Structures are given as C-alpha cells and as structure tokens.
Amino acid sequence: MKKLVIGILAHVDAGKTTLAESLLYLSGKIGKLGRVDNKDAYLDTNELERARGITIFSKQAVFNLGEIQVTLLDTPGHTDFSAEMERTLQVLDYAVLVINGADGVQGHTRTLWNLLEMYQIPVFLFINKMDQTGTDEDKLLKEIKKQLNDCCIEFGHISTDGLYEQLAMCSESLMEVYLEKEYIETDQIKKAIGERRVFPCYFGSALKIEGIEEFIQGIVKYTAIPDYSDEFGAKIFKITRDEQGTRLTHMKITGGSLKVKDSLSKNSRDEKINQIRIYSGQKFEAVNEVQAGTVCAVTGLSCTRPGEGLGIEEMSSRPVLEPVLSYQLILPEDCDPKVMIPKLRQIEEEEPELHLVWDEQLQEIQAQIMGEIQIEILQNIIWSRFGVQVSFGTGKILYKETIADRVEGVGHFEPLRHYAEVHLLLEPGEPGSGLQYSTACSEDLLGKNWQRLILTHLEEKTHKGVLTGSPITDMKITLVSGRAHTKHTEGGDFREATYRAVRQGLKEAESILLEPYYAFELELPEKMIGRAMNDIEKMSGVCEISQTDGEMAILQGSAPVITMRNYQKEVSSYTKGVGRLFCSMKGYESCHNTEEVIESTGYDSERDMENPTGSVFCAHGAGYLVSWDEVKDNMHIEAFLQLKENLSERATQTYTTSEEKQWISQDEINEIFHKTFYANRGKKSVFKIHKPAQETYYGTAEYSSIQREVKEEYLLVDGYNIIHAWPELKELTKDNMEGARMKLLDCLCNYQGIRNCQIIVVFDAYRVQGHKEEAMDYQNIHMVYTREAQTADQYIERFAHDNQKKYNITVATSDGLQQLIVRGAGCSLLSARELKNAIEEANERLKQEYEELKRKEKIHLMDALSSDVKQQMKELAEKKDN
C-alpha cells in the first residue's frame, strides 16, 4: 500500500486536534468523535494533555484513505512545546497548517510557515472555525495571501476554470500550460504543490465536520507518494519511554526496510532491534518488518538521539526553535544531585533542548526551558517518574555571542611528547545561521584523518564566547592550516589545540553580545495605540501599525524577550481584557544593554580554566603557557590571513633594479626546495627560510644588504651522529633520547643567533614503517625527519650535491665515509668536536662582548658622575673593605 506521512500544525487553539478527530472519524478509523474539552480525543493520550486541553507531545494515528495509508502526526501548538513540533517536521511528506478563522494569521502561524519553508515541506491549509460569527472567507484569504504567500489558493468551492486561472498565476510553467491547453492536468498540479509553488486552501469547521470531505478528497487527489531508495535509511525524530520504562526510538524509514533482530551500528558498537511498534493513538501493533515510508518506534537502541540519521540518512541540523530561558532546578534538601542527574538525563533524551547542566561553580542544576507551562509539565513528569518534588528558580535570559570581523584563531598544544597546531578562520555568519564548519586546508600540510578529527572536535563542544561566557553562534569556522608530529601527536592533542584556536580567535575578534527577540502582534483598541507604542519604545522594541478599522488596531514589531516577558498582563490590564498579544520567537539580535549584561555577568575569559584562551609550547624539554596575545609570535606555521595579504601585495608589487634591494621570488624558493627536500616526490615544498612568526613562509624574501650573487650559508647537522659523539649528550640518551635531542637543538638555536646562518638538523626516521619525509621549524632552526628507507647520510648527500652551487654548505658529522662524500661535493666540513668547539667559542665570544659592553656602560656612568659623588663612592668602598 502507498504510504504518506502528514503532520498537522497550528497556533494554539486553532482546532488542529479536532481536525485530526474529524479525519479519523470520516476515514473510518474511529466510530465516535472525541473532543478536547470532553477529554476523550483519540490523540490526546497523556493525562496532562487531557487535564490542560492542549497537545504537549506529538502523537501519531494510522488510517487509510482509499489506496493510501496515511500516518497522521499531531504536533503541539503551544510555543512552550514548539521544539517537539519542530522535531516532527523532518519526517513529514506533507503538512496541514490549521488557521483559526476567527483570529486569522497569528504570530506563531508565521513562525510555523517559515519553518515549513526552511524544511521545504509542501503545505495544505485548512481554515477552521468558519462556523463562528464574523468570519469572512474572502477577507481571510486576502490576509493569508498577504501574510504568508500569494500562491495560497482556495481549492474547495471555486469553479474549475477559476482554479486554473489562479494556478496559472503561480508560475511561468503553469501559465504556459494554461495558455496552450486552457486547462492544467492533475499531475501538473501535484508537481506544483510538491515543489511548494502552490498552497491549496480549504475552509470549514472541524467541530461540525464541515468542509472535511472536500479536504480529504483534495489530499487524495493532489498528493504524490515519495520515491524511496532500496538502501536502508531512517530518520530519528523522537525518544520516549513507555509505561514500563522501555526506551523507544521513533523513526521514519526512508529507504529499504527494517526487520526485528536487525543490527544497527551506533557509536562503534552494534545494537539489535528487539521490537518494532507501529503506534496509532495509545495502542500499538508489533510487526516483524517495516518498509520505507513507515513511521515506527523500535526498542533495543540505547544511544540514539532526535535528529540522528541511520543508514543513508545524515544528522539533521540543530533546531531553529530553542529555549531562551535558563532556570535553576531546585531539589529537595534530602535529594543528592549526583543521584538525581542521571535520572534527569532520561528526560533530556526525550527533550534535548533542556540542556541539563551541572554548574560546578554555583553547585546547581540548570535547565533551558521554553516557558512557564513547560516548567509545570516537567515538574509533573519528574514527580510521576521519580517521586521527587522539584521547583525552579527565576528564569534568566540565555544570551549568545558572535563576531563582527574576520580573524584567524591559532591553537598550539605541545607539552613534552605531545604536539598539535591548529589554525581556524572565524568569519561572521548570517543571523540565525548558527555555526558552520568546513575545511580549506591542504592535505600536504595536514592529513585528511587529522582534518576530520579537528572538525569532530569543533562540533562536539559548546564553545563559549569571551564577553559573558555565552555560547557562540552565527559564525563560519574554517580549518585553514595545521600541523601534526609523526611521533608525538595524539588525538587528544588536536582537541586541545582546536579548542584553544577558537578561543584565541574570539579574543582577537570584535565580539557582539546577542539576546533573543520576540516578533509580536498586538491587537488593541485604536485609542490606546499611543500608550502601546510608548511601551514598546521603552522596551527597546520597534513597531508599526499594520491594520486598523476605526475601532481596533494591530501593531506588529519586535522587542527583546527580557523586556517583553510579562507584557501580556499589562496589556490585559490597561485594555480591560480586550487587547491580545501574540509573541513568537524571532531569533537573536544585538543586545540592547550589552555593557550592563557584561558587568552583571562578571565573566572573565582569562580565568576560565575549562576554556583556556592561551596555548602550550615547549622549550628545553618542558611545556610552558603562552597567553592568547602572544601565541602568534610563537606559532610554528605562517598565519593564513597574513599569507593572503602578502601574496596580494606581491601580485601588485613593482620590483627594483639590481643596484637596489634584491628580491627572491617564491617560484625560485619553491624550485630550490623542490629539487632538494622533495625531489621525485611530486610535492610542493612546505619548507621555509626562517623568518619571524608574523611573516608568511611563502612571501618574497628581501635582502637589502646582500647582493644576489652572494651565497647564503647553510649548516647541515647529522643529528644522531652528533648526539652520540658528544659525551654529555650520549650520557643523556641512556635515560631519555628526547632530552638529548632537545638539548642539541637548543645549543644550535643559540649558535644560529650568533652565526646568523641557516641550520638544518637531520634525524634518521628510516626505520619507522611508512614514515614520510617531514620538515618543520624549531624556534630559529629547521628540522628534517627522513622518510622510510632514507638515512640522514643520504639526505645530506643529496642536499649537498644538488645545492652546493647555490649555497655555501657546511656539514657537521663525524662519519668518515660521509666526510669523504661531502668533501667531494665541494662542501665544507666540521667534525663533531670542531662543531662543539665552534659553538663554545661563539658562546665565549658573546659572553666577552657582553662583559665588555657592561664595562663600557659602567665607565660611561662613572664619567658622568661629579667629583664629590665619586669621592663618596670611594670612601664607601674603603669602609666596606675594612
């Protein structure tokens, strides 16, 4: 049988549950109409729903319309439970939007319409309660066209010719068909509805079953059954527990089929489907297999989440409608939070937007909640399930943060025997876009597996802003560069570097504090417009008169949630119950009182130890902290933004003559190193002539005092050969080879500062299986780890052979055979002993120069003193000697 999934959505009290009852009754699913006010509606199965007369949890009913099996999903209409409604949207084939004919298009109706557009769901509209006095079909249709879409067309009572004429106005393709044939075929209308170019409207009364037959016929005639893949796929939209506490995963099968005892892989482990249930109202039918297009609940899955995809389905994006209030959840004095939190996690599974958090600093449980009614429902659920009477504190607004400019964030994590560096480009996103992650990093710089790991770390955490510690949003974060170490990098290293890169970038950027805003519609007597507009202005909101008829007027606008939270009571008071305020969540905008919020929050990003802004570097065999504003002075990879800036400058630069400053182009540098480090490997060089960290590796290198024909000096050091030749380093290798290597590197760093030549230290890695040649910087010198099956001797021999005409090359080694080869290549030679002597002599010379400088400064100071002061100093010195 053909399967169709239809959801019913509406602003609260529009009558959608009553419409569902009418559809079930006329389809033959139920023999008696239930009513919400009689507490016997087929889909209001929960005691709380029947007590309050509202839909709190989405429910499903299965019934047949001819050859079509319809799964009807009734969703909550109250804004406090809009997240439950939004989760349902991801499994719908079509939606029915119910509008109250007495009230017209209300604030939450427009929110629902925008959500349906975002999820690209075809929509049928049913304008309900047309039996009430004062309803006008033509007036309502004009309002719907104006407020929602001009292609909302009346399908119920219109003539065929009139319908074709209106359909032709909705798209060029329909217009062409109509002009050619003077009619439009049903399949073409189906296609237009499915593509959201046409929105059929039907008028009636669900309570009196008026217009329902025509509506059902329209659904049967103008809906198309989706095509599904043969490969298995499923979309999870809900987690619940039955009366026995069994965990249920509600999903729609979107491809292939699912059987009992099938295994599904979740979080690196397989879980079996124990039971498949097809619910209809309060009852369910257990089946052995379900096909694509079926909405079912399964048992046996323990770690599923709403929005998750199985098989060919991917994870859904974060919900648009999220809580904007945070409340303290207060437990009884005899209730241990550590015992209670795991129980509350069950409820969080069912309501992911709760975001239950244990605040260690405040020693309290915090929950994010949509509104006051949801609090009452949560209290009731916690009591009925766990027998604990909880209360909630005063709600606090949930702020968010974003940035106004583009920055590059750098995170470095290098304690001893660990290494990772991450560069992230942080850019402002469109309002309401949330966080978007991508990568634009070359795999020559960072392997694909590391890049995927970094993206995972970005997505796994709620990143805090630096103004108030609020979550960041509306930002595009792109991985642009990074570095790993073959031996020392572990997965956790990139987690640390990634988190620190985000925070470092936020510290550099211009941060903006955001707060939630309501979009509102205020209906009140026309004579009270001035009072209302003055109130809105005081609330830092904006508004305009959208409609007036001489007696009543409608104001539309937006205002911060925090200033408008309790305005409904005030409206009822000064209008004596006549005025009505409809609010819906508009989204986050710039905070109207940023400085006040920041001051009241008292957040200090530098003291947030769980979200550090600085990085960890290593020197002399020990890690040390570097503050966020100094990270880029110490980083090991060139800044991405600086690179782009330098390349842009170079593209427009005019080069001087040879008598003036000489420039070496990037092409020349790449060609040199392509012939040395990366010969026969088909890769571009990532090695660089050392420059300060703020400069790019790839920009042009300027030499103002050296003519191009003067060769640059290179010192190549056979690392392990020197380590084993120097007694003090060889002694260190017995306990710690890494310590010996670091001590050698530090000695050479000091030597480079004195000699001012290029130093390359080469270490063997030829025994490491699968190791690729790796070049990196260590402070002001370069390091190379050879590839598999290549010794340091071979590397140095090749470099000397290929570059002896370009550079003055000296090789430091005590290997006799290598010394012969190096001399044959025309290079200079230093033995291990000679290198050590040269370093010691340079250090001694530097020390002497320093002492001489101090002596001259002292002499200069004495010369500047008067004779009286000199005499006093002489007398003091004599007394000290005596």
Image (spheres, helix red, strand yellow):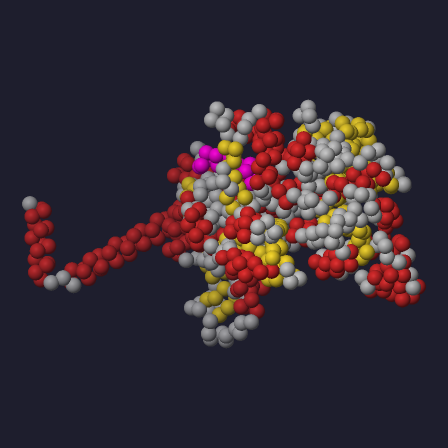
| Quadrant hosting residue 787 | top right
Pick whichever, 272 or 64, lies toward us.
64
Going 49% across and 57% down the picture, which residue do you hit?
538
The magenta region covers 354-368
Residue at 58 percent of width and 42 percent of height = 371
Pinpoint residue 208: horizontal percent, then vertical percent: 80, 43
* Residue 452 appearing in the image: no
Relative to 299, residue 596 above or below: below
Q: Residue at x 90, y 41 (%)?
A: 66
State the image coordinates of residue 111 (x, y, percent, origin top left). 66, 51
Q: Residue 279 versus residue 355: which sits nearer the camera?
A: 279
Above or below for 136 versus 284: below
- Residue 65 vs residue 181, the one in the foreground: 65
From the viewer's perspective, is 135 left or right of 548? right
Task: Identify the image quadrant of residue 456.
Answer: top right
Quarter of the image that includes the N terminus = top right
* Numbered circles on residues, count: 0
In the displayed structure, does residue 70 sit left or right of residue 698?
right
Asked if residue 592 can be seen in this view, the reply is yes
Q: Position of residue 597 (x, y in %)?
A: 45, 50
